[in-house]
Amino acid sequence: MGKHASAKVTTVTVTPRQALWLELMAFYTHEAWLLDERKFKEWLDLFTDDVLYFMPRRKNVLRREAHREVTPLGDLSLIEDDRRYLEMRVARLETGMAWGEDPPSRTRHLIGNLVAEPLSKGEVKAKTAFLVYRSHLETDHQLLAGSREDVLRRVNGAWKIAKRTVLLDANVLLDKNLSIFL
Amino acid sequence: MGATQKYSIIDPATGKIDRGIFSDQAVYDQEMEKIFGRAWLMIGHESLVPKVNDFFHTYMGEDPVILTRDGQGRLHALLNMCRHRGNRVVRCDDGNATRFMCTYHGWTYGSDGKLEHVAGMSEAYYDALDKPSLGLVQARVDTYAGIVFATWAEDAPSLEAFLGDARWYLDTVFNRRDGGMQALGPMKWLEPVNWKTMVDNCSDNYHVPTTHLSSARVQTRYLGRPPLSHKDQFESPNKHVFVNGHSLTFREAPDNTPRYVHGISKDTFPLFQAYHEATLPEVERRLGAFRARHVQLGNHSIFPNGVLGFRLALPRGPLQTEFWHFVLLEKDAPEALKHAIRIGSQANNGAAGLFEQDDVDNWRQVTAASKSRLGRRISQDLSMGLGHAGAHPEYPGVVSERYISENNQRLFYQRWEEFMNAESWADIPIAPITARFEGTATLHG
Ligand code: FES
Ligand SMILES: [Fe+2]
């Protein structure tokens, strides 16, 4: 053994909050790869049975009325899916006849700016930002930006998303449809 | 001024149409003038501006328009263009304001459009500015069952005449309840599609079993909805009818079941049936027994760009359309029913809608086909069901014998020609109202 064998081993202590952050960052990186590699059934496994997947609209309102910028649950939204609708979306792609995604889009999900904070009853709130690139058919392409606010809980030891709120940074969506997952 | 250019883009004997109308900038510019500058256009819903001084930002063609309810509760459609240099005076989607101040030099308008205040009226303008003539430009406004329409044309006929007998059918969705409807939305997105293809699609039930096959499959599996096969469509008792520019489909349904909308599933059907039965006496009083029990409006468009319900195809150049999706709910319906309709509507229609996702690439390629050298020389074929439509003893308008037909499309493009070739409204034929409007419902609800 060389002289390095006696080198001092440095132990890095992480706080519980940092440990959570590391764990969730790995979770979101994994999720991004599932989506970009079109493993949608495995992606569905990341959600709880009682999931609410919500994408409100963004309105132009004055700064002093900022509370009206994001449409609340109960208003018309872009997506307000329960588990059954999420499953239908994935099952649809698998029919091989969902023409809007067949041939499929090429996507790249970049997820970052993670902030995680424990809630009560073992649940966790995690906010991330995303840049998602979509390329479809020959030259159609779109860059979608926004944030996701998730409520996660452990089911059989694994993190699952119980609620996801996707805030798209757009008023008029510039893409021809929203046929990819965010 | 030269005579109006005469378009002859459809051969009614063969159903061939000239593809150039989907991509030519010159044709598009004429459409803005001759169609969007003349017709009554759907621009909003009264429920979007319920209180005095509420406003909702909308469009007439490409012209930005503020729908306001003034201090007296009257509706106005105001061109969102300051009369000084032309800045927009409203940049919000909606809100409540007694006046609109232009952010450029501060000219300020009331919610009724009047120019109220000009900075430097005496110091800069020597009191010589004619304020009364410089209010925001206003369109004519009228409503049908809460839906707000506006037109720039002073010589346009009344909204009632413009809708004509189409209203006899439209009432079966929009005018059923005493309490009226409320609009939620819009969800907005930009499609690389000519606006006419979306309108044309409202009477195209031929595409459903092919375009929407995947969604129909999973809906049968998960929600217990019918498969929407070709057989279903070909054997459907539904009909197409064309009235005064408006393309409609309807169901002749003596089975007395609720209208089949997104949101109905095996689980929710009893809720819809119970609501149908509970409201039937009211609907019979309002629309008469025949319409209440036998007629259900299906997919439809209101000329020129009102698409399937209260949804708008807003032209943005020949190759682009901004699509606005709203959902309309009967105000007095039970919350559980409203919830089911809202969820069904937004999950199936709209940018992320299971059904609507699959429409767009088809439509955009129909638009794009008209750009290539060879493509544009080869006409579209709209010959389906030629010679199989006409007057019907019970139903007003031109009724197609079969549900799957291109009669409405042919007549839509003929209507398009009538508008494009007219010097003024005097040249645009309006079909007389012949339907018997039984019941108490009126144009205004
Ligand atoms: S442009 Fe509006 S005040 Fe000058
Ligand atoms: Fe469709």
Image: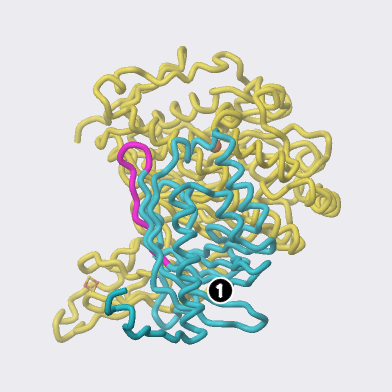
Name the secondary structure under disc 1.
loop
The foreground one among B225 and A127 is A127
Counting other residues with Cα less than 10 Å from the Cα at mark 1, is it few (<14), some (14-19), or many (20 or more)?
some
Q: What's the residue type where badge 1 is placed?
A: Lys
Residue B76 left/right relative to B397: left
At x 57% / y 82%, what residue is drawn?
A118
Chain letter of the residue carrying label 1: B
| Residue A65: % across, % down | 45, 80
Specify the colour of chain B.
yellow
Q: Say which quarter of the image contains residue A139.
A: top left
Residue B263 left/right relative to B353: right
Quarter containing ligand 2? top right
Specify the colour of chain A.
cyan
Q: Identify the magenta region.
A: A136-146
| Residue B128: % across, % down | 18, 76
Q: Considering only vertical position in the picture, is A126 above or below B46?
A: below
Q: Considering only vertical position in the picture, is A20 above or below B91?
A: below
| Residue A115: % across, % down | 45, 78
**Disc 1 residue: CB within 8 Å of ligand 1:** no
Secondary structure character of the magenta stretch overall = strand
Q: Considering only vertical position in the picture, is A98 above or below B336?
A: above
Q: Which residue is mark 1?
A: B51
Q: Say which quarter of the image contains residue B145.
A: bottom right
At x 51% / y 78%, what residue is drawn?
A20
